[in-house]
Image (cartoon, coloured by chain):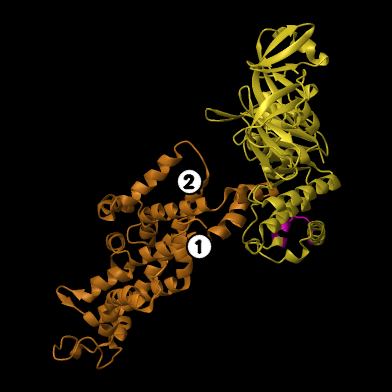
Amino acid sequence: MVGSNRLSSRILFLYVPLALFTIFLLFPFYWMLIISLKPNSLLLNTKVNPLYLTEFTLRHYRYLFENTEFPRWAWNTAVVTFGATLLSLTCSILMGYALGRFRFRGGNLVGTAVFLAYLIPPTLLFIPLSQVVVRFGIYNQYWALILTYPTFLIPFASWLLMGYFRTIPRELEECAMIDGASRLQAMWRIVMPLALPGVLSAAIFSFTLSWNEFLYALVFMGSGQMKTIPVGTVNDLIRADVFQWGPLMAAAVLGSVPVAIVYMFFVDHYVSGMTAGAVKG
Amino acid sequence: MAEVIYDHVTKRFDSVVAVNDLTLEVKDGEFLVLVGPSGCGKTTALRCLAGLEEVTSGDILIGDRVVTHIPPKDRDIAMVFQNYALYPHMTVYDNMAFGLKLRKVPKQEIDRRVKEAAEILGIQELLNRKPRQLSGGQRQRVALGRAIVREPQVFLMDEPLSNLDAKLRVQTRGELIKLQRRLGVTTIYVTHDQVEAMTMGHRIAVMNQGVLQQLDTPENLYDRPANLFVATFIGSPAMNIFPVKVVSGDGAYRLIAGEVTLEVPPSHRSRLADYVGREVLLGIRPEDLEVAVSNEAQRGDTVRLPVELIEPLGAETLVHLRGPAGTLIAQGEPRIRLNPGDVVTVRVRTEHLHTFDPQTEAAIF
């Protein structure tokens, strides 16, 4: 924009707010990290500055691996997350494509219904769902979460993909079909490569939500060895009113790592997926 | 190569009839242009032939095969889209090879055909580029190349030149004509541009509101339009149309509008017999109005009209005249010396007059 390029105004209106925002956003992670590395003796000591480390220890992490089922929780979380993401993505791609491409009677109604389903809060849904889970005989098994997470993943992911598919010119598929492709071949060889940013966005979204989910995991898969990281951390590291801050924060740090890695790799695609069709181009 | 037949094809979208009982025969090797204003059903007719739209009733034949319910991939056609529809994630080579790969054509054969087509179109050096690295004209060539390599029975083209700038459009138009004559593949070409229609087609099918108005050679379409719509749609500037009264007397028929009186040439008289005493619509093409600056006396084929406006176009000058019912446009000589307000003598080439029934709008002669 004209006139907005002077250095002083850039510092004042761009970098200062940006810096404040970044500090605000990153502080909880910093706090989490330093607490997980502090020896117990310093944790509740009010005489030292709590904002930085004076001593450094890894014993909270060791505690996590030696005295709790943390590796098992991580494995459970991974299985559930990958299962739910894969299932949701498959369904969402097919649904998003159908809703975005085909004109059929009731198509808009189905689209709206799917979206409304997304608006029902899980806190309301978990009670009837628990009945379903028990009747299906999958209580406290991986399937309990792999099959219930899609209830909130599919609506959002299919809407995101529907919007994305609509940005891909119809003529490309039509041309492919005239060139000799069936509808599925056209979808797989022409539409999917072009929809990759959208699909990745949906995948990241599903992955993050499944990885962090707490309520369903607590209710449907919360006992014995079957806990996920969020449930296990809260269940086993908070005993009555005793918070084991060190191991708690260590678990939180380790639990955030996979999500951070996923974002790091795909952030460019994620942004382009979320803003697709927002502007002409 | 094959002929294409539309047999009473109708296509409805809910309550809208996009194509209404279209019957049309395209000969083997012919270049047929489907032309009409936007929304006239020409693109829908083409998409029905491609199999991208299901017809509501009627049949479509390619060769002697009824393809009405055959999916696009099995119709053995190739189509060039208005926006080219190049696959953005593939190189030019892969774009052209895509259809052949799907048909499991051997690799060497694909390579041979792609290189041959690239040579015809002069795009050999672009084969490794992606579509986004190409200019509009180059993309257009690639789209054409993709159709050529398939060696289909029929080419379908949906306004392939409309995204090019004016100069490139004229150049590509010529190349496309030469290419079609050389390959001899039956081609159906959709356009809304009547200049493209006139220059490119062996025959032209004019459509309006889903109905085929006239199917004929460019010359016949221009000289003997079947109805008012075709008469005004084909030709630029458009034909002048105004109502006149048919009067008979002294063994001659005259067309009268205000102070303008024109004598009907003897050859056309018999057709007008039923209209004596009634109004008809008179059509005169701008080039059939000859503007003369001289002050000669009025005859049966001249009228005196005031000049409203002069539009010098270089090769010709459009003279807007105040006619009996609105403006008449005459195509005058280049560098003609006239000013608005001048009253000029205009000679009408009465042998090229057109008349239309005011109710049915069908041509009388």
Per the image, the residue denoted by label 1 is A197
Chain label for disc 1: A
Q: Secondary structure at mark 1?
A: helix
User: Dividing the picture into quarters, in which one does residue B145 lie?
Assistant: bottom right
- Picture coordinates of residue B358 (x, y %)? 64, 16
Chain A hue? orange
Q: Quadrant of the N terminus of chain A?
A: bottom left
* Vertical arrangement, residue B150 with respect to residue A203, above or below: above
Query: Chief secondary structure of the magenta span?
Result: helix
Mark toward the start of the polypeptide (2 vs 1): 2
Q: Which residue is tagged 2?
A: A99
- In the visual, does B328 lie left or right of A158? right
Q: Chain of mark 2?
A: A
> What is the span of residues highlighted in magenta in the rendered image?
B93-107
Q: Is A22 in front, or is B310?
A: B310
Q: Position of residue A222 (x, y in %)?
A: 28, 64
> Is A118 placed above or below B132 here?
above
Identify the element where label 2 is drawn. helix
Q: Residue at x 76, y 38 (%)?
A: B333
Q: Which lettered chain is shown in yellow?
A: B
Q: Nearer the viewer, residue A234 or B35?
A: B35
Q: Residues within 10 Å of mark 2 (few under 14, many from 20)?
A: many
Question: Where is residue B202 shown, x and y percent of the image?
Answer: 81, 36
Q: Nearer the viewer, residue B298 or B138?
A: B298
- The amino acid at mark 2 is Leu
Q: Residue furthest bottom?
A: A55
